[in-house]
């Protein structure tokens, strides 16, 4: 087999990928000679493909519950989208108890998928928690991951539906998380870091990282109420300004907010611009003025309205993503997003929130590094470990990988753009959680096939091959079947950004 595989590799020019795992294929069927594709996984040969038809050479020995449909919980925070507008609510409703109804006037904020004890997912059929299932059968996670992360999923996968700005926040690095948790376990429930990645499902707005100094300086010059509030200090003294003014009852903040909003209303077309330096404003002035008005309506007289001028304003189109490493300051403003993070619930908050604020810790932990927003965006790359069938290729279906520089998680977004389009994910040595955000299809693991609709969530155990297929009957955009698959596989990827 090895010899044949090598010959095939040479013949197709594909080459061998790595030493431990060799996957031999030609992803473009138009280039593929009509013969055999060998497929070898994890040092043992398991499948032989003839053309597009798979022949299984070895029986699959998958642990029980390798395909499990978890029931997921949804939080009702004030910032969530209301009623059916909320993707989190619609998705949660697909597995909710019969008495659950999405209420028209209630906000639904976050859907959680995973084993975190604050809102654990449960098997729809047996009601056993996913945590229980993976602790009972550690092969579902793989031994390596089970040992490394204490028999829990290393990541927490979420859907957020944001109507109103979330708190300005940052997540502690591992060392600080341990200290905060030891000191104040009520407000810092985990001793883990929480790097997080956001992928837009609908158009998204948020604040992320500090603006480049030139932009901050520009706003300090152009916006009188901001200059008054901060005084004539340089932008780098902002830390002190926030520290002194975190209490929104403070009358100077209130006055400054009122002046800020009045200014945004009176001259939206030139808001935040200098007559001599219009170009230094990175965003459309009218848009900037509109957002200031919106934030002030959501949080009247909040210091957060001013933080806006210090942070990058980012817009993501559906499918675009950003990655926030530990200590990166951010706030989400609007949109439905898929979020993946290390399994932790630690947040250090400063503004835009009625929740516990810890401005002191926040200002101490922030790294005042300035960068343009383009550097914060995370660009997906083609995911090479999916085999697409001919219908998938001819409809330009794709699997894209969002791979942040940490080891706890990566996410693959797959769009199958026509009925019959099929994607086969290579088995990985780690667990996956899959959510469908659009269309209809099926998911198959081993001998088990289940129906998939918008909002359906599945857990797939380690070493299981997973196949998804579009079974929709719509036309064009309506016929797209979209899934997001979060997974963890310890492949020696170094944890570069979180100081571990
Ligand atoms: Zn966050």
Image (spheres, rainbow, N blue to C red):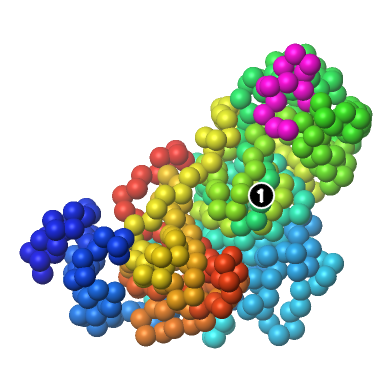
Numbered disc 1: secondary structure: strand
The answer to whether 3 appears left or right of 359 in the picture is left
Question: Residue 337 location, x and y as percent?
Answer: 62, 56
Which span of residues is magenta-colored?
Answer: 272-284
Residue 412 in view of the camera: yes
Q: Is residue 144 above or below residue 389?
A: above
Spot occupied by residue 39 in the image (x, y as percentages of width and height): 22, 68
The residue located at (75%, 13%) in the rendering is 276
Q: Quadrant of the C terminus?
A: top left
Q: Residue at position x 62%, y 61% from top? A: 159
* Residue at 45% over, 76% down: 420
**In the image, is residue 493 part of the stretch drawn in magenta?**
no
Q: Residue 241 appears at what percent x and percent y?
A: 75, 24
In the picture provided, is 412 more to the left or to the right than 298? left
Quarter occupied by the N terminus: bottom left
- In the image, taking residue 197 as reference, residue 286 lies left or right, namely right
Name which residue lies at 39% across and 78% down. 445
Magenta: main secondary structure: loop
Q: Is residue 483 visible?
A: no
Query: Looking at the picture, how far across and down is residue 11, in whole percent?
Result: 14, 58
- Few, some or many residues within 10 Å of mark 1 (<14, 14–19, 20+): many
Closer-to-camera residue (292/228): 292
Q: Looking at this rendering, what residue extends furthest in the left direction?
A: 3
Residue nearest the observer in this picture, 39 or 376: 39
Against 266, residue 99 (above or below) is below
Could you say which is closer to the camera, residue 267 or residue 205?
A: 267
């Amino acid at each position: 087999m090895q010899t044949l595989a090598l010959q095939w590799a040479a013949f197709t020019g594909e080459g061998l990928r790595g030493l431990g795992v060799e996957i031999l294929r030609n992803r473009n069927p138009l280039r593929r000679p009509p013969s055999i594709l060998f497929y070898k996984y994890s040092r043992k040969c398991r499948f032989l493909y003839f053309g597009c038809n798979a022949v299984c050479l070895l029986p699959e020995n998958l642990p029980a519950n390798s395909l499990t449909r978890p029931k997921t919980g949804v939080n009702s925070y004030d910032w969530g989208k209301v009623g059916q507008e909320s993707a989190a609510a619609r998705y949660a409703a697909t597995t909710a108890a019969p008495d659950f109804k999405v209420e028209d006037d209630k906000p639904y904020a976050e859907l959680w998928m995973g084993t975190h004890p604050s809102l654990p997912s449960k098997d729809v059929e047996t009601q056993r928690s996913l945590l229980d299932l993976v602790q009972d059968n550690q092969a579902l996670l793989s031994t390596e991951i089970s040992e490394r992360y204490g028999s829990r999923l290393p990541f927490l996968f979420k859907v957020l539906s944001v109507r109103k700005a979330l708190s300005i926040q940052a997540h502690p690095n591992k060392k600080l998380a341990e200290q905060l948790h030891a000191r104040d376990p009520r407000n810092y429930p985990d001793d883990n870091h929480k790097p997080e990645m956001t992928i837009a499902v609908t158009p998204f707005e948020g604040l992320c990282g500090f603006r480049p100094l030139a932009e901050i300086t520009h706003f300090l010059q152009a916006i009188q109420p901001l200059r008054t509030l901060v005084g004539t200090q340089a932008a780098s003294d902002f830390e002190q300004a926030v520290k002194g003014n975190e209490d929104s009852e403070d009358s100077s903040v209130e006055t400054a907010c009122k002046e800020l909003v009045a200014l945004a209303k009176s001259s939206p077309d030139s808001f935040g611009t200098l007559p001599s330096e219009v170009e230094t404003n990175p965003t459309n002035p009218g848009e900037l003025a509109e957002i200031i008005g919106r934030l002030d309506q959501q949080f009247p007289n909040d210091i957060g309205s001013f933080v806006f001028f210090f942070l990058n304003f980012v817009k993501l189109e559906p499918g675009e993503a950003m990655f926030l490493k530990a200590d990166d300051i951010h706030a989400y403003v609007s949109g439905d997003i898929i979020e993946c993070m290390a399994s932790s619930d630690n947040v250090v908050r400063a503004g835009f929130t009625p929740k516990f604020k810890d401005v002191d810790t926040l200002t101490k932990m922030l790294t005042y590094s300035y960068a343009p927003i383009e550097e914060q965006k995370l660009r997906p790359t083609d995911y090479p470990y999916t085999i697409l069938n001919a219908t998938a290729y001819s409809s330009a279906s794709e699997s894209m990988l969002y791979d942040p520089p940490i080891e706890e998680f990566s996410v693959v977004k797959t769009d199958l753009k026509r009925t019959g389009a099929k994607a086969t994910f290579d088995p990985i040595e780690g667990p996956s959680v899959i959510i469908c955000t659009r269309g209809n299809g099926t998911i198959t693991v081993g001998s088990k096939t289940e129906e998939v609709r918008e909002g359906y969530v599945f857990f797939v155990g380690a070493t299981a091959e997973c196949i998804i297929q579009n079974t929709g009957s719509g036309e064009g955009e309506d016929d797209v079947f979209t899934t997001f698959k979060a997974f963890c596989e310890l492949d020696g990827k170094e944890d570069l950004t979180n100081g571990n």
